[in-house]
């Protein structure tokens, strides 16, 4: 064939060259380390799932419009996973009798959503998913939020860079019902309007609430909830279970010295219907990027979609790689050098048997030193250029004359210092 | 909805529960460590690619029949990647001018093939891909084979457990042309028959060769090649470039003391047309599983599919997770305990404020000790059951009476030893 193929990746997806991959391995590694230290267990599931899994939980909109889906040769309707929660709920349901609750689980899967690409939103992305199953109390909500803050702190992000905004759906419904003197269904409609508060003009917002039967005094009472402290807000509905959960949660955050990262925010609702208690979103505080990076909440009993009479509560969050990377770049939190601190290239000359060089590289590797023989057949000057471009810190030089005298020259490419040593001495020096 | 969803994963795919994931993280981690120490760089690419990428390289059979493919809403014909080589060739082509050759790259992507599931073959699998670009000589072939052996050795696999069987396509073609007195096209047809030698009855094999114009003496001469040493075999075609490559490669393997893992095997051909030089397969030597686990070879200039007049040679191999796991299980190479060596559960009692426990767990984590508060609200006996089942090695006990006296009890769940200590002493003990 004479026509050449395109070298571009598919729209909304990315190629990860070695420098990109080092960055990703670093930030995924930080997540893993923080979560494993907190005794979370990693799991994973298949990239393809039955399409009905998403239709049942997320509604037809997400299942059909935002999901890559197709029919296989066995007439099964499949989807590439657009999120992880249905998979983990399915996995928990499948082994409900054998698993030991509470479960603290996480995963960092790749997933696909069919959408218009924009900053922070791509078609293929990776997403950390953290979930705790089998705890009804606020303790699991605390543990989730704590793990999210600990991950951010492990990136050396400070309290002025991000804020965890916390609300509670039970509290929200109760306070709306009390403020607007409406029933649960009425509160649900009002909540939909409030969820869009910052996205529509003030007049439209008020008009929608008036249409739902609220008066201006009631609207003002809702306005007053923004900016209230947890104590003042929960005093409005002291008997609400949501109020109790909020107070317990904030008290525990205070005790762990995590309250400085957190605020109560009546505006955090999270659109999805399945949230039932604590909801939270982590905001980037940078003025140029001030928006929610990720979030989550309590979503009681998704496992019930699979198992009759099951009752396993869950709380969790998802953190996408694209927004996280934007955050780390914006706040200059990416370490300068993510490569190996020492990396030695064994230069190669024609007047010494090649086997001498491979044996040197192998001895270095066995001693734990990252190393390679130069595999090409270019002149020495080109080998140095290669070493510098590829991030090697040292080059080991043994031409015919050094080989005869039983020595090597060890050149430090950062300081340009060069020493003549025995190979064993060079190895000891590189090991340090 | 009243009908419950299935909890089974899609056919030919797997759910990875925490114990499965620990195993995978271990064996993928070993690969990463060996390859990074040998200065290979990790990369990754998208799960979805243009379908034509596979049609161009692998032929329509693989592209259409074995690939999950579909048309997106923008009328693009896409495929879930069934292999990684087209992606890496595309990525190298896209940055041909900027990259510094030789490249030593690896990746551990997940991929899909539509096929009948059987032992060692699933629809979703992970595959280590190792490739070196930009080296025409045998040095890159050596480096690839060496890295494969080093990975196997890092699993503590010994020479009696696996064998690297090596051949050379250039040598093969030349020796067939010489033995069978045929031209290149004739040699290609003969090679197809020889590739199936072990899969068909002897009579059928001979009949096919006779039909291609070979006589019995020529067939006997080909038979004799099996079991020959490299020296004897390459003496038949001393002038062949393939002979020289084979001799250089085996000499270098000898010098690195790797020859004991390797044999020359005239029967290794590897079906795909694009191999041009060295080819190799790694066999499991276990009698119950004696077959090729993985392999690779030299496939000059796949980058030429993308860039006019490009000429970048490549050599690489792919190692699937399913066959590797079978190998590790068969030879009992999986370490007993892949979890954290120390894992401490902070037990919880109602007569002590919860914040005391979360602070203890957090202090342990900051000291690098894997730990968690028990998040549920069960009695102490149940908390111990939970700790044992979840692989905790220690439990920290501080009820009301211990809290009053400013002590904790540290119970080692493996030895059942229990000590009363200050929290600081317990922390020091767990850190060791």
Image (tube, coloured by chain):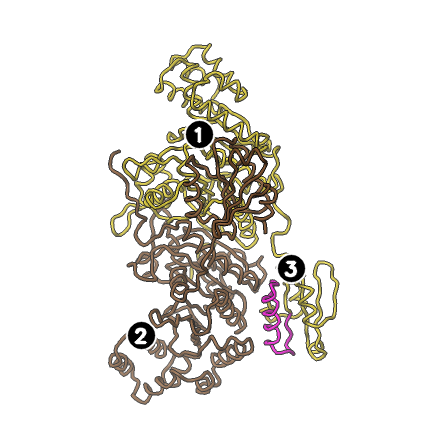
Chain colours: A yellow, B brown
Q: Residue at x 46, y 51 (%)?
A: A9
Magenta span has B46?
no
Magenta span has A360?
yes
Report the front residue among A65 and A25: A25
Question: Which region is colored magenta?
Answer: A347-371
Report the front residue among B248 and B228: B228
Residue A269 x %, y %: 45, 27
Residue B217 lies left or right of residue B22; in this view the side is: left
Mark 1: which secondary structure?
loop
Image quarter (top left, top right, bottom left or bottom right) of the N terminus of chain B:
top left
| Chain under callout 2 | B
- From where the camera sits, is residue B156 visible? yes
Q: Which residue is mark 1?
A: A270
Mark 3: which secondary structure?
loop
Residue A340 x %, y %: 61, 57
Figure check: A324 above or below B142: above
To the question of a shared chain for discs 3 and 2, the answer is no
Q: Residue at x 70, y 61 (%)?
A: A413
Q: Which residue is mark 2?
A: B196
Q: Which residue is mark 3?
A: A342
Figure check: B294 above or below A48: below
To the question of a shared chain for discs 1 and 3, the answer is yes
């Amino acid at each position: 064939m004479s026509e050449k193929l395109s070298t571009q990746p598919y729209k909304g997806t990315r190629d990860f060259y070695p420098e990109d991959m080092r960055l990703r391995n670093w930030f995924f590694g930080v997540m893993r380390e923080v979560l494993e230290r907190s005794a979370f267990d990693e799991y994973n599931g298949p990239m393809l799932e039955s399409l009905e899994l998403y239709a049942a939980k997320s509604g037809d909109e997400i299942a059909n419009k935002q999901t890559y889906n197709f029919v296989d040769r066995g007439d099964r309707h499949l989807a590439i996973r657009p999120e992880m929660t249905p998979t983990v709920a399915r996995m928990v349901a499948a082994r409900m009798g054998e698993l030991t609750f509470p479960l603290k689980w996480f995963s960092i899967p790749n997933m696909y959503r069919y959408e218009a690409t924009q900053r922070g939103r791509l078609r293929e992305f990776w997403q950390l998913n953290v979930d705790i199953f089998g705890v009804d109390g606020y303790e699991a909500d605390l543990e989730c939020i704590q793990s999210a803050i600990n991950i951010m702190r492990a990136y050396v992000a400070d309290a002025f860079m991000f804020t965890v905004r916390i609300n509670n759906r039970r509290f929200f419904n109760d306070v709306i019902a009390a403020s607007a003197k409406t029933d649960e269904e009425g509160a649900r409609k009002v909540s939909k309007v409030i969820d869009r508060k910052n996205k529509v003009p003030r007049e439209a917002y008020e008009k929608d609430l008036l249409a739902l039967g609220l008066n201006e005094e009631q609207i003002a009472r809702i306005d007053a909830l923004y900016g209230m402290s947890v104590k003042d807000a929960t005093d409005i509905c002291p008997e609400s279970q949501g109020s109790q959960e909020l107070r317990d949660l904030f008290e525990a955050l205070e005790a762990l010295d995590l309250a400085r990262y957190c605020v109560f925010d009546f505006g955090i609702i999270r659109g999805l219907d399945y949230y039932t208690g604590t909801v939270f979103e982590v905001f980037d505080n940078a003025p140029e990027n001030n928006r929610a990076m990720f979030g989550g909440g309590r979503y009681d009993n998704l496992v019930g979609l699979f198992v009759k009479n099951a009752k396993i509560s869950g709380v969790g969050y998802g953190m996408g790689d694209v927004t996280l990377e934007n955050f780390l770049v914006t706040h200059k939190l990416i370490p300068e050098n993510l490569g190996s601190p020492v990396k030695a290239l064994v230069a190669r000359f024609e007047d010494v048997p090649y086997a001498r060089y491979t044996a040197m590289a192998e001895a270095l590797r066995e001693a734990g030193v990252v190393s390679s023989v130069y595999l090409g057949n270019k002149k020495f000057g080109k080998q140095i250029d290669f070493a510098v471009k590829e991030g090697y810190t040292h080059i080991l030089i043994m031409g015919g004359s050094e080989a005869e005298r039983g020595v090597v020259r060890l050149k430090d490419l950062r300081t340009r210092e060069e020493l003549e040593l025995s190979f064993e001495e060079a190895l000891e020096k590189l090991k340090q």
